[in-house]
Amino acid sequence: MTMDVQALRAAAGTITFIPEHYELVMEDNTPKGFDEKERTFIWEDPHSENSRIEVSLSLETGKLMRLQISQERDDTIWGSAIEAGRTTEQAADIAKTFMIRHHPNYAALTWIRSEIKRNYVEIEFRAEAGGLPLPRSGCEIRLDADFNIVLYKAEEFPGMELPVWPDRLVSAEAAKQRILQDMEMQPIITTLYPSIYDMEGEEDQHRLVYEPIQGRRKIDAVTGEPLHNLQHDLLPPTVPITPADPGNLNNVYPVKPVLPSRTGTEHSSSDEDSDLIPFWEAQLGIDTERYVLDKPRGDDQNLILLYFDKSDMNEDEADQSATDPLSVDRYFERRWGKTLRNLQAAYMIHIDKATGSLEAYHYKPESSGGEAVLTREQCWDRAERFLRRFFPSYAKYLRLEVKWDLEAGITDSEQEGEEGEAEPRDREFFHLPLYIDQYRVRLERVNICVSTITGEVLLYRSVSYEKIRELEACGFKAAISASSALARYAEQLDVSLRWYMDGDDGTAHYRLIYDPVYKRRAKTGVSVSEYLLEFIDAVSGELIWSKLRAIERC
């Protein structure tokens, strides 16, 4: 039963101190339009854009689900206050008092974790079984340097019974061997960034590495078997593309305009940018009588063009007049109106200024209400035509992802289109990972979306031609074998027992699992840095670790 809105509003105002000059700017059910479970209230300081208080109460029980207090602070002063010696025990006591006041299951939340993260203290309360915390069973509380509560976030505990510790478990060693049984090492190309990885130097580095396949599989602690099948953690398989025009196979450059000559400056000028605009309007068939170009934007590398339908320019203002001023929609419009408006553009185009090439294209047509008339194969034909124009070397550098046939263990890019197997879709998506020689490039791919109704390309995202040239120049070649890389990776494998929530809201239940762990820690004074093993360098055999976090413990 939903509680009275007036009662919820009165309760929200008592959760924390709200300064008199703060204004109520939002009051609505959230998440809006979906599974609305909470009533959310937001107060803001009219003189400070970043000072706000957000309170969310359960529509069913009226209990506090979320409190967030944001204020402008001096991080230097804030950080030094924590280092002055106040303990996490003090913070935990304050957090526990707040938790008892607001959490309906506070007596069951006996597992507590406290740690300092940068400029705040984080406290977690969970229910536990066998000494291990249960996911989605408690709350998280964050305190600032003065030990004021600035965040409270209650989990949506599904209300199931606490699990019973199993009578029999497989050993940790057996779980490790089961993980290793299916693990393989795949050579891929990746870019390492000093801000993310533990590496020497301050420059980004392109590397050929071995990436573990099936290295993160969770093992049921009772049966000793993986929770999911082999395909669950695998990227979709790919197939080579037979080029429609083999003559363009070795051309790495797209169709592009003749750029104005540079006048000794490092970056393009606004005049040179203006030369790109009519070229791409013509190439992409944009009707400039119907669509108006917003002010061009971007940076030194990219030019971003947004086009809006002239007939839609005034519709938003008319819609707002009938909307509750405290609604979610109006609040978002006031706070992020320009950004949200950009998302409604009929065309969004990204152009690389250095080459004049098309990097991204998004077309948002009016809803036609028609029926799908094109098969996936026909949509691929339209996508390939687009690639031939704007990425002529697509067959050399790209492969086409296809779908798993989970029962037969084979792939078939067209099987989903067979009669009775899937409902017609209004668009087809094609994902094309980038390959340099035989090696896949991690996180780099071309995406194309084609309407099954009109055959128009609705979305295109390319890859950097400059990066392709850089990677080709590296001449990657593995110096150590996959088996050797696997042996090095396996040396770092450990497992930890933890509770895992399996299933959705209707069937959710806890399972005890062994989770693979590939971590190391480095301690400097009171600071502890944690790292996760990601790759094995395919040339040197070096272990490559990503930086997880740096925490301070008291």
Image (cartoon, helix red, strand yellow):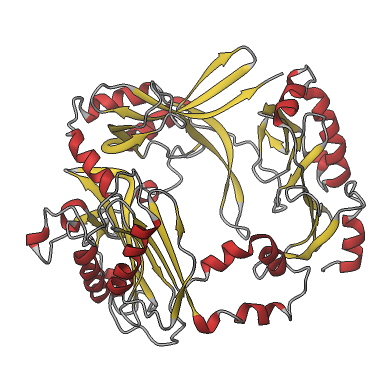
In the image, 514: left or right of 207?
A: right
Q: Position of residue 390 (x, y in %)?
A: 24, 63
Q: Position of residue 296 (x, y in %)?
A: 45, 62
* Relative to 295, residue 169 above or below: above
In the image, 547: left or right of 233?
A: right
- Which quarter of the rendered picture does the C terminus lie within? top right
Number of numbered discs overlaid on the protein picture: 0
Residue 276 shows in this picture: yes
Q: Looking at the image, which residue sits at the far left?
A: 247
Residue at point 62%, 60% (across, down): 506
* Relative to 329, residue 552 above or below: above
Residue at point 48%, 31% (across, down): 170
In the image, 311: left or right of 87?
A: left
Residue at point 90%, 46% (across, down): 17
Q: Position of residue 330 (x, y in %)?
A: 71, 69
- Which quarter of the rendered picture does the N terminus lie within? bottom right
Residue 174 shows in this picture: no
Residue at point 63%, 36% (across, down): 165
Q: Nearer the viewer, residue 333 or 159?
A: 333
